[in-house]
Image: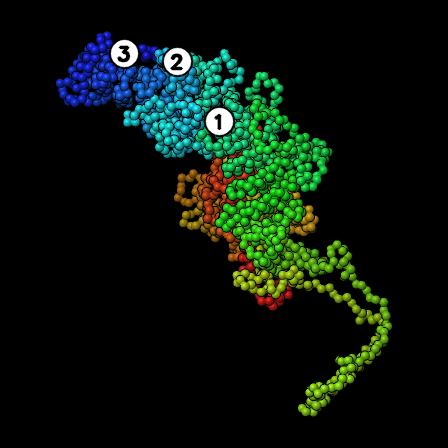
């Protein structure tokens, strides 16, 4: 740097200017003269007693007098310390005279000196040097007196420079700097001795030198020769920690200003204390700051030299000490050099802080940073700490005399944002009462977006950091004896490199000494932070990468020469190492794996790591690196990893492939999971385990498919093995999978370097089968399930977060596809989950809490997934019994049999005391799954719906004579069973030709809607001709006139033997008829009756005779009286038959229960009520499964505007091909109008519509087709359905609308007036078809309902494609329009004007209004007929049904109107600023519609990783409205969780999780920083989104499961439409036809 300039060091050291003419006289003469003269002059000083004596004021009148006096004073300044008074007077005189350049000089200053002050001041600087000359053999008291005088001189020199800086000439500035260099070199160059003058004032001298030198840079920039002299002399002072302290202090001050000048005030500031900030002159220009910063930075040359005693001790003063001392033989043996390790650490820490400053990071320290430094330095080595004195071992300046603060690396300088406040720091470095400061990964700095490139920072600090990181390391190719290596500092010319030459012998000694490990660890950490700060598409020079890899290779050494602090620092600061596109970074994977095995295999390490990095944080760092390399083996496969340092004598070592590390990675993950105790670390490992199993299973499936495509016989030849039952079957499955995987990807067991000598991860010897089992998805699945289930029961069952994570892993394992199934392990897993539920339910009452019940509910949900995905397990009697027993426990709170020997306790005998209502509801859901869905999911219509798609309109349409619903009477009769099930009965069959008793029933219950068609049959349907045989006329028998023998028989009331029994007197008690007639004079009436009887007898005899005569005359057989078959009955009262046959219609069921609030078991509803259909429709729109929504965004490089982000997906040319493949892996595309499930918005979900003329889907989009207008991406299982929406600019059109502020802004929602075209479609055709295909339908149900047809109704919802549009209406049009918002809100949403118009007099607002495709813009709004307002009963039931909207209207064609705006292809020019949107103004609070979790999920694809910190979340929230938001919430207050995905050049994907801290943010399998393969990315993202929403539901106190909400809605319907009938009235109404 200063090669062409000469150093002034020799001239300064040999300058005779401090000698006096009195030196040539004897000492006594000079002493007497000086004492006499000075004593006389001191009386005239302004500080003297006689300061006002005018006679002694101006004795020195000429220049000759002044110079003679100065010669005397010069000699007096060199007097021994015993002459303290004379020495003090000399100092006082010169301190007075130094004010000559002040605006108001002291009165004692001679007039001659005031005329040419600069010349005399330069001479005084040379004389004052004598004050600082050490006086050997002086006592401690005298030395302290000398120190006081030196402090006084330094203080006045500082005052001169600060108050008279503009009057100082360049010569005076240079003289002052030379004076400071001379005294500093005199005091600091010799070896430090305790209590000498250098020890007393050395720190203050260094401080004044640096401060005044910095001041000179602003007013009189030093010449290069002075800079070179400064640097050369400072090399002799490096054994003093004060030098490094002040060097760091000035560097941080200049760096802070440099960052402001170069990067602006918004760049994270390197904030310094107010006192240090005042040191920097305000008049310094940017160029002066840059030049001063660069020169000060290299003042002490290479800081790594501080670690080498041989370099520091080879100075002239040390050599002179060794030659003159009788004790010290080798200069390196001086005691003062023992503090070099701590000085070296301070220097490297200073460099590290400067590196962080340029990276723009912030150190979030909360404890005293000096305690951190001291504890860090004291942890270098136990042996060094015990023998090493403190840093200030030579003593210190008394606090009352110390004017400058001591060294503080981070105490006074910390990196904070410009808005951060300055926190108080410690002023001194003390090793007493230290509290260690612990680093955490959460405190890792956030990099600034405008930070310099890595190459730029490495140009400045790279050489020092590389040398520090390789300290004590013998680089390959270095000769042991002869050759030497030159370490060059940054920007150092060839002349100065001689100072950095170290021989190989010094390397050996340094390698044996571990005292410098703290500084080396700091250098390694700084390097890792630099390289991990690499931006996307940023390139780093290969030479830097090579040196970095070599440094890390040696720092990660786990052999006997390992460095615990360096290893810990590398792991802690390089968690992003494998997440960046660093060229050749795979060469470090084996070495990293070795280090991670040491850290993760045991929780009680045998080596000493970094004292400031807790073991938990170190393990977390290792886990982060482990999560980054899980997908590497299957991604790079047989790629060879070259060795960085290859031994010359080892020529037999085989290269290592990436795939060969897979077993080691798997073993390490399982071992770490077994020994980990920290909850956060455990959850991260569980996420990694899910990724490992999922990725391996998909990989094997893809490999098998590839082999099948190549060889048709590969599927049968690759896997063919006999599968014995039970355990043998499981073992055979695993062995077969091992063979299959071995044939696909052979692996090598050779490791790089020391990788083969890693620690043993098993506590017991493992068999060959166990090791090989980890190499297959089948075996890994079993081990993962076993490890997680056992740990869950043993250690994690009391921790909610870990338990939820473990349950999520087990649930994820249920989705893993294995061929063949690991049935034994699946059965064990279900048994473990049941045991977990039993244990948690059986805990004592004080332990029951919301968290405990959340674990039980999550376990039930997991059990539900396992039973559906592995339905064959319920064929096992033991498994079925275990599951049902747990379900019983959840519902009732106890088991029927606690032990097998106990007698069963029936349901009627038990008291229902479940653990909680949540647990009961979860158990009920499992029971429903077992009954309805196990083995039958997905249903025939696909996974989009778990129940029937048929409704009343659909069933009525299937009957002959179907008419418009508005014109037909109510044909359904509705009954409610047990206040929980609504049965709508249509007493007709779907087949009009069927004459048997038939009915069609729509059964609505808590778990969905089901359609049944039933007939009363005596024979099965398999008898094809049964109905024909019954209805066919059997014909008459052959005619036969023989009627047989006619017997005349007299009919008696009693047998004949009765007449032979004699009568008793009692029998005569009843008078005879004759006696009664005679006694009562009734003879006449009796005779009259007898005449009537006789006439009737005669008539009958006559008619019998006539009939006999007619019959004899008639032919036989008589066709007129021939027998005919009776007509078939078509009125069976099937509703009565159904209720009776199924046991619902009983007298007990109709009785009112004792509880007045409950209805009877059987209730009839008022089917004629017009509002009943609306409430039933509202019930149908309550889903049977939980529903979630995720919004996908694509962010191009450096995009921060919301409108630009949503425009990216309009064309496939704007997005990466990987993005399109990713969104296709999230789910399958579905048509919103034909979809019966969740579509991402309430207005279009859970109903099917049909467009009149469906337009073809747009092609070539970048994902905008899935914005919810026509299509979304959908995925569902038996308990959850999720929609993935990709917002586009076509969803909303933001246009300003000017509405007078005096009139409230309300906009009408027009209803469609045209008649829908109602068509029928097969249920089997309603399943979506796209790639990836949804789960296959159930074959059994497909065959059973093949002929069942579903009606697809057109939606009457006034929203365009399930979304709300924005348009503009003039104030004139709104004045003539009575407007309202249907169902959602009657309030307008006011948004500030988005146009930069100068006129702000009128309020500009944007109002949500629906758009109808059937309206044209040219028509008048006034022509829109006012829509029929919703009924009172339908306010919470969603949009009105088709029957309601068209009721009472004619079917005349209506003019088509529209509010559509012209189509705008792009909206970049608008760039609206989106304010907070009040969701409460967009929907009414409804107790019917289910609320989604109070959370928003965003999936953001990043082209540049750095853009995740600037993603405009608030500006995009208006696109995430689903209609399920809480009525009182605002979108800006939402808990938003974001999953950032970045595609690496290697083909892998980096994941970043962002969200508010809480349990939902801890959902797995995705973990922040995980690196995922493409084949598993979509599945893991989908599982993570679902798990986040599940956790949020568990946290919510207001959430109710879907079947509970449906049950409450049913009860509400019963209370509104129940007919309170007595038993007779009920039967009467039941026998009457429906009205």
Examine the rendering and report whether any part of residue 864 can be seen. yes
| Rendering quarter of residue 1137 | bottom right
Q: Are marks 3 and 2 in contact (CB under 8 Å)?
A: no
Q: Where does the N terminus fall, quadrant-wise?
A: top left
- The quadrant in which residue 89 appears is top left
Q: Residue 1156: x percent and y percent? A: 53, 63
Label 3 belongs to which residue?
17
* Coordinates of residue 1633 in the picture (x, y in percent): 64, 64
Q: Which residue is drawn at the image coordinates 64% and 31% (left, top)?
A: 768
Between residue 635 and residue 166, name the one nearer to us: 635
Q: Secondary structure at mark 3?
A: helix
- Residue named by callout 2: 329
* Camera sees residue 1009: no
Q: Nearer the viewer, residue 1275 or 1261?
A: 1275
Residue at x 66%, y 45% (from the top left corner): 872
* Quarter occupied by residue 1064: bottom right
Considering only order in the chain, which callout, 2 or 3, is on the residue closer to the N terminus?
Answer: 3
Q: Is residue 443 above or below residue 1015?
A: above
- Does 165 sit left or right of 767 as displayed? left
Give the alpha-carbon distance from disc 1 to disc 3, as whole Å: 54 Å
* Horizontal side of residue 723 vs 649, given as left or right: right
Position in image of residue 1374 (x %, y %):
46, 49
Q: Which percent across, then down, holds residue 296?
A: 38, 20
The residue labelled by disc 1 is 564
Dot 1 or dot 2: first in sequence order is 2
Between discs 1 and 3, the one toward the N terminus:
3
Q: Quadrant of the C terminus?
A: bottom right
Please name the residue shown 53% across and 32% down the image.
602
What is the secondary structure assignment of the residue under circle 1?
A: helix
Could you tell whether 201 is left or right of 418 in the image?
left
Residue drawn at x 61%, y 32% is 765
Tag shown at residue 1612 = none
């Amino acid at each position: 740097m200063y090669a062409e300039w000469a150093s002034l060091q020799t001239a300064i050291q040999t300058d005779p200017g401090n000698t006096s003419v009195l030196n040539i006289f004897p000492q006594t003469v000079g002493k007497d003269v000086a004492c006499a003269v000075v004593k006389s002059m001191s009386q005239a000083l302004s500080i003297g007693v006689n300061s006002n004596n005018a006679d002694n004021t101006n004795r020195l009148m000429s220049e000759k007098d002044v110079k003679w006096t100065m010669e005397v004073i010069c000699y007096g300044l060199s007097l021994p310390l015993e002459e303290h008074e004379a020495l003090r007077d000399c100092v006082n005189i010169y301190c007075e005279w130094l004010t000559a350049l002040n605006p108001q000089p002291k009165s004692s200053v001679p007039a001659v000196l005031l005329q040419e002050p600069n010349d005399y001041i330069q001479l005084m600087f040379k004389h004052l040097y004598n004050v600082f000359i050490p006086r050997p053999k002086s006592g401690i008291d005298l030395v302290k007196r000398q120190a006081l005088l030196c402090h006084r001189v330094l203080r006045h020199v500082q005052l001169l420079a600060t108050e008279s800086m503009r009057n100082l000439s360049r010569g005076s500035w240079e003289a002052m700097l030379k004076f400071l260099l001379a005294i500093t070199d005199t005091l600091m160059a010799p070896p430090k001795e305790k209590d000498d003058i250098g020890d007393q004032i050395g720190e203050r001298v260094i401080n004044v030198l640096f401060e005044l030198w910095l001041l000179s840079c602003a007013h009189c920039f030093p010449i290069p020769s002075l800079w070179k002299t400064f640097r050369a002399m400072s090399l002799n002072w490096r054994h003093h920690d004060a030098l490094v302290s002040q060097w760091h202090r000035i560097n941080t001050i200049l760096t802070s200003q440099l960052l402001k000048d170069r990067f602006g005030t918004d760049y994270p500031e390197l904030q310094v204390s107010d006192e240090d900030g005042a040191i920097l002159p305000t008049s310094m220009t940017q160029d002066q700051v840059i030049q001063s910063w660069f020169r000060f930075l290299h003042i002490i040359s290479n800081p790594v030299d501080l670690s080498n005693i041989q370099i520091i001790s080879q100075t002239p003063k040390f050599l002179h000490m060794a030659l003159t001392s009788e004790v010290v033989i080798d200069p390196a043996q001086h005691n003062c050099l023992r503090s070099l390790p701590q000085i070296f650490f301070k220097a490297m820490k200073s460099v590290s802080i400067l590196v962080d400053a340029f990276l723009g990071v912030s150190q979030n320290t909360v404890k005293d940073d000096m305690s951190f430094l001291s504890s860090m330095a004291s942890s270098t080595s136990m042996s060094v700490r015990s023998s090493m004195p403190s840093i200030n071992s030579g003593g210190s300046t008394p606090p009352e005399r110390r004017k400058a603060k001591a060294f503080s690396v981070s105490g006074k300088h910390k990196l904070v944002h410009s808005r951060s406040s300055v926190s108080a720091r410690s002023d001194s470095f003390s090793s007493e009462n230290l509290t260690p400061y612990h680093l955490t990964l959460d405190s890792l700095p956030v990099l600034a977006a405008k930070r310099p490139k890595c190459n730029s920072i490495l140009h400045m600090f790279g050489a020092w950091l590389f040398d520090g990181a390789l300290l004590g390391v013998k680089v390959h190719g270095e000769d042991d004896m002869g050759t030497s290596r030159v370490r060059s500092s940054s920007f150092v010319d060839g002349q100065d490199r001689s100072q950095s030459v170290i021989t190989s012998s010094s390397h050996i000694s340094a390698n044996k000494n571990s005292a410098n490990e703290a500084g080396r660890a700091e250098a390694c950490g700084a390097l890792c932070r630099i390289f991990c700060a690499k931006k996307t598409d940023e390139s780093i020079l290969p030479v830097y990468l090579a040196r970095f890899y070599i440094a890390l290779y040696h720092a990660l050494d786990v052999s006997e020469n390992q460095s615990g602090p360096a290893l810990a620092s590398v792991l802690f600061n390089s968690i992003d190492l494998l997440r960046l596109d660093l060229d050749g970074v795979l060469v470090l994977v084996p070495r990293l794996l070795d280090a991670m095995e040491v850290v993760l295999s045991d929780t009680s390490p045998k080596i000493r790591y970094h004292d400031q990095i807790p073991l938990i944080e170190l393990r977390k760092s290792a886990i982060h690196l482990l999560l980054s390399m899980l997908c590497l083996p299957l991604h790079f496969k047989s790629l060879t990893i070259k060795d960085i340092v290859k031994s010359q004598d080892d020529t037999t070592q085989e290269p290592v492939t990436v795939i060969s590390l897979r077993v080691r990675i798997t073993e390490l993950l399982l071992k770490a999971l077994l020994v980990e105790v920290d909850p956060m670390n455990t959850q991260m490992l569980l996420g990694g385990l899910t990724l490992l199993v999922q990725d391996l299973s998909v990989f094997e499936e893809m490999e098998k498919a590839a082999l099948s495509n190549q060889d048709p016989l590969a599927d049968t030849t690759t896997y063919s093995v006999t599968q014995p039952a039970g355990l043998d079957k499981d073992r055979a499955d695993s062995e077969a999978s091992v063979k299959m995987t071995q044939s696909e990807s052979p692996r090598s067991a050779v490791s790089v370097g020391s990788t083969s000598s890693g620690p043993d991860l098993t506590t017991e010897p493992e068999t060959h089968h166990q090791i090989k089992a980890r190499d297959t998805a089948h075996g890994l699945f079993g081990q993962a399930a076993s490890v997680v289930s056992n740990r869950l029961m043993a250690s994690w069952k009391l921790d909610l977060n870990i338990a939820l994570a473990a349950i999520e892993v087990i649930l994820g394992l249920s989705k893993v596809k294995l061929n063949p199934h690991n049935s034994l392990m699946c059965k064990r897993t279900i048994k473990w989950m049941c045991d977990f539920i039993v244990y948690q339910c059986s805990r004592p009452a004080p332990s029951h809490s919301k968290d405990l019940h959340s674990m039980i509910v999550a376990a039930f949900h997991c059990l539900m997934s396992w039973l559906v995905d592995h339905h064959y397990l319920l064929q096992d009697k033991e498994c079925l019994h275990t599951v049902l027993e747990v379900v019983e426990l959840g519902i009732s709170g106890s088991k029927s049999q606690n032990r097998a020997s106990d007698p069963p306790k029936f349901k009627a005998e038990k008291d229902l005391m479940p653990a909680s209502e949540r647990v009961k509801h979860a158990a009920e859901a499992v029971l429903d799954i077992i009954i309805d869905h196990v083995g039958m999911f997905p249903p025939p219509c696909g996974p989009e719906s778990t129940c029937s798609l048929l409704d009343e309109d659909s069933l009525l349409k299937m009957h002959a004579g179907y008419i418009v619903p508005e014109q037909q009477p109510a044909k359904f009769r509705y009954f409610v069973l047990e206040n929980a099930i609504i049965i709508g009965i249509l007493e007709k069959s779907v087949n009009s030709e069927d004459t048997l008793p038939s009915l069609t029933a729509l059964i609505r219950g808590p778990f969905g809607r089901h359609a049944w068609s039933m007939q009363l049959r005596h024979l099965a349907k398999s008898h094809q001709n049964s109905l024909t045989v019954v209805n066919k006329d059997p014909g008459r028998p052959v005619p036969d006139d023989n009627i047989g023998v006619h017997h005349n028989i007299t009919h008696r009331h009693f047998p004949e033997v009765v007449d032979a029994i004699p009568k008793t007197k009692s029998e005569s008690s009843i008078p005879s008829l004759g006696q009664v007639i005679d006694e009562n004079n009734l003879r006449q009436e009796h005779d009259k009756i007898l005449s009537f009887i006789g006439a009737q007898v005669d008539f009958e005899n006559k008619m019998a005779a006539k009939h006999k005569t007619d019959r004899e005359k008639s032919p036989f057989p008589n066709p007129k009286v021939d027998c005919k078959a009776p007509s078939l009955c078509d009125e069976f009262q099937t509703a009565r038959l159904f209720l009776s046959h199924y046991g619902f219609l009983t007298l007990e069921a109709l009785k009112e229960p004792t509880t007045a609030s409950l209805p009877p078991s059987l209730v009839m509803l008022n089917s004629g009520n017009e509002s009943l259909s609306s409430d039933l429709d509202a019930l149908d729109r309550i889903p049977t499964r939980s529903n979630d929504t995720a919004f996908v965004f694509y962010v191009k490089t450096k995009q921060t505007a919301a409108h630009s982000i949503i425009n990216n997906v309009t064309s496939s040319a704007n997005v990466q091909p990987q993005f399109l493949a990713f969104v296709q892996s999230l789910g399958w595309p579905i048509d919103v109008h034909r979809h019966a499930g969740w579509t991402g918005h309430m207005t279009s979900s859970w109903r099917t519509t049909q467009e009149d003329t469906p337009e073809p889907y747009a092609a070539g989009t970048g994902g905008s087709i899935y914005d919810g207008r026509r299509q979304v991406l959908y995925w569902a299982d038996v308990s959850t359905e999720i929609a993935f929406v990709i917002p586009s600019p076509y969803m909303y059109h933001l246009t300003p609308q000017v509405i007078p502020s005096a009139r409230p802004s309300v906009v009408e929602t027009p209803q469609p007036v045209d008649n829908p075209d109602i068509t029928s479609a097969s249920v089997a055709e309603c399943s979506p078809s796209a790639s990836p295909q949804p789960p296959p339908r159930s074959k059994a149900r497909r065959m059973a309902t093949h002929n069942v047809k579903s009606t697809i109704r057109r939606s009457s919802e006034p929203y365009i494609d399930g979304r709300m549009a924005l348009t503009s209406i003039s104030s004139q049009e709104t004045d003539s329009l009575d407007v309202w918002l249907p169902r959602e809100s009657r309030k307008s949403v006011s948004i500030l004007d988005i146009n930069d118009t100068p006129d702000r007099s009128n309020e500009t607002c944007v109002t949500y209004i629906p758009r109808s495709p059937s309206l044209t813009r040219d028509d008048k709004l006034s022509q829109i007929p006012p829509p029929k307002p919703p009924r009172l009963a339908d306010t919470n039931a969603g949009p009105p049904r088709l029957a309601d909207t068209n009721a009472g209207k004619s079917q005349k064609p209506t003019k088509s109107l529209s509010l559509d705006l012209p189509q705008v292809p792009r909206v970049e020019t608008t760039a609206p600023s989106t304010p907070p949107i009040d969701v409460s103004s967009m929907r009414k609070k409804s107790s019917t519609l289910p609320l989604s979790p109070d959370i928003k999920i965003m999936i953001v694809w990043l082209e540049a990783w750095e853009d995740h910190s600037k993603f405009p979340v608030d500006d995009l929230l208006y696109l995430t409205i689903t209609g399920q938001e809480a009525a009182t919430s605002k979108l800006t207050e939402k808990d938003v969780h974001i999953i950032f995905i970045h595609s690496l050049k290697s083909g892998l994907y980096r994941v970043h999780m962002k969200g508010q801290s809480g349990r939902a943010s801890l959902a797995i399998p995705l973990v922040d920083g995980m690196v995922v393969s493409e084949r598993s990315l979509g599945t893991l993202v989908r599982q993570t989104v679902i798990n986040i929403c599940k956790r949020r539901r568990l946290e919510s106190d207001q959430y109710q499961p879907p079947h509970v909400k449906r049950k409450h809605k049913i009860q509400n319907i019963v209370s509104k439409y129940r007919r309170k009938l007595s038993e007779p009235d009920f039967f009467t109404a039941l026998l009457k036809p429906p009205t």
